[in-house]
Amino acid sequence: MQPSSHTISLLLADARLPSGGHAQSSGVEPALLAGMPVADVPAFLRARARTTATVDAGTAVLARHAALDCIPVAPIERAWAARTPSRAIRDASKDLGRGLLRLAGRIWPEVRASLDGLDESPPRPLVLGAIAAHTGIDAESLVRLTVYDDMACAVAALLKLEPGDPAQGVAMVLDACSSIEPHVAAVSSITSTHQIPAASAPLSEAWSQAHALTTRRLFRA
Amino acid sequence: MPENIPTRALRLGVAGPVGTGKSSLIATVCRSLADELRLGVITNDIYTDEDARFLRSAGVLEPERIRAVETGACPHTAIRDDITMNLLAAEDLERDFAPLDVVLIESGGDNLTATFSPALVDAQIFVLDVAGGGDVARKGGPGIGRADLLVVNKTDLAPYVGVDVPQMVADASDARDGRAVLALSRSDAASVAELRAWVLGVLESHRRGTHVPQDPGPMAPHFHADEEHPDGGFVHSHDEEGGHEHHSGAPGHVPSLSDTRG
């Protein structure tokens, strides 16, 4: 018996999934180190959800299509990279993708074949898309999963960096995830690379670049 | 048959509480073996890349062979529950400097309970020091009880901190059912030679394919103080499965220092 695609979605969204996510902060540590007030974190998350997380979600949707239709994924990676100008953020996503692929390749070996043409560190959304294709996760669920995972990672890191009421952190995740609901249908129905949203977050990207050079950090990015 | 299988580097973990000399021990291993072995080092710092920088500045290896991974404030997790970042770093080092003989992985300085997953390292050293107190070895824990080697470090400081080194080693040996214990000081050449010989012994059995990674496992039996108990407390164990014991003399068991010394 195959596990239900819903169970796979839960598995992929679980912070305890051993794929290296615990060393990431979704840009929160870079932002706080750069002096962003903690009170701005909810707004930061909503902005991230609308920008970089939506770029990732669109990329994941296309990677899912590519895996289902056996289309090369290299152009999708290039389209994602063009929309992710910060090297530090691209590197973090590739670390996450590599860790996730390391795990997924063991559980669903066909996921690797769908990422042929990429190096051993595909960006996280491409790996998520390939897993979705092989485990029956639909495009809308994939969009929500991609955004949720990024937001949950941010808040888990926030609780270590600026400990506060954990319930407030949960509320922030739900707030940021629900803020993209009006866009889920559009993002989940794209079919070509030029339709991937091109929304960047220059300030956050600059913070991530600076963070990559600091010698005092808890998180990779 | 084994010679047809490309052997990857021996992955050797170094764990132990903060300040017991893990980085210094790694520098000592590198200094004594860098001429004959191809080495790489991964550090798991909690809040900086201080350990990696210390090792690079020690000049014991090319700086590129020493890499730091972030642990997301969870040094336990990074070496035990989710070892992804460390595995990726080890694979990168082994690829970039192929072939390597040994990759040393230093844990983030943590308390007495953190040990490496056998899925990450082939063998592990647990480091205590005399300055931490002569009674620490008696307190037990998975690393003290069942790491492949327990090092009692900084023995040169013993006169200044009032610790009886032979007694601390004897306590440690008791806590470990005779597994290897080494009293080490980087200024004591004989002890450094013993450490060097131990690493070479593990590497040899790793290459022969006879070394089996062991999990130090759950908390070792330890003492709970209890004023109402007639003995002032009781010994308690979490080791209920008992399936992962590290039996002396089992296949793959590396002769301990105490074995070789007779």
Image: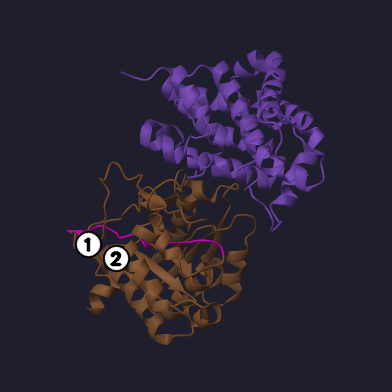
Chain colours: A purple, B brown
Q: What span is in magenta?
A: B1-18
**Residue matched to label 2:** B179
Instruction: Identify the residue at image location x=40%, y=58%.
Output: B140
Considering only vertical position in the picture, is B188 above or below B10? Answer: below
- Chain letter of the residue beneath label 2 in the structure image: B
Rendering coords of residue B199 (x, y %): 35, 71
Category of crowding for the residue at label 2, using alpha-carbon neighbours closer than 10 angstroms: few (below 14), some (14–19), many (at least 20): many
Is disc 1 placed on a helix, strand or loop?
A: loop
Viewed as shown, does residue B103 lie left or right of A138?
left
Category of crowding for the residue at label 1, using alpha-carbon neighbours closer than 10 angstroms: few (below 14), some (14–19), many (at least 20): some
Q: From where the camera sits, is residue B258 visible?
A: yes
Q: Quadrant of residue A164?
A: top right
Is disc 2 placed on a helix, strand or loop?
A: loop
Instruction: Identify the residue at image location x=53%, y=39%.
Output: A97
The amino acid at mark 2 is Arg
Gap in Å between the C-alphas at discs 1 and 2? 7 Å
Considering only vertical position in the picture, is A133 above or below B186? Answer: above
Q: Quadrant of the C terminus of chain B?
A: bottom left
Viewed as shown, does residue A202 lie left or right of A7?
right
Q: Nearer the viewer, residue A199 or A14?
A: A14
Q: Are marks 1 and 2 in contact (CB under 8 Å)?
A: yes
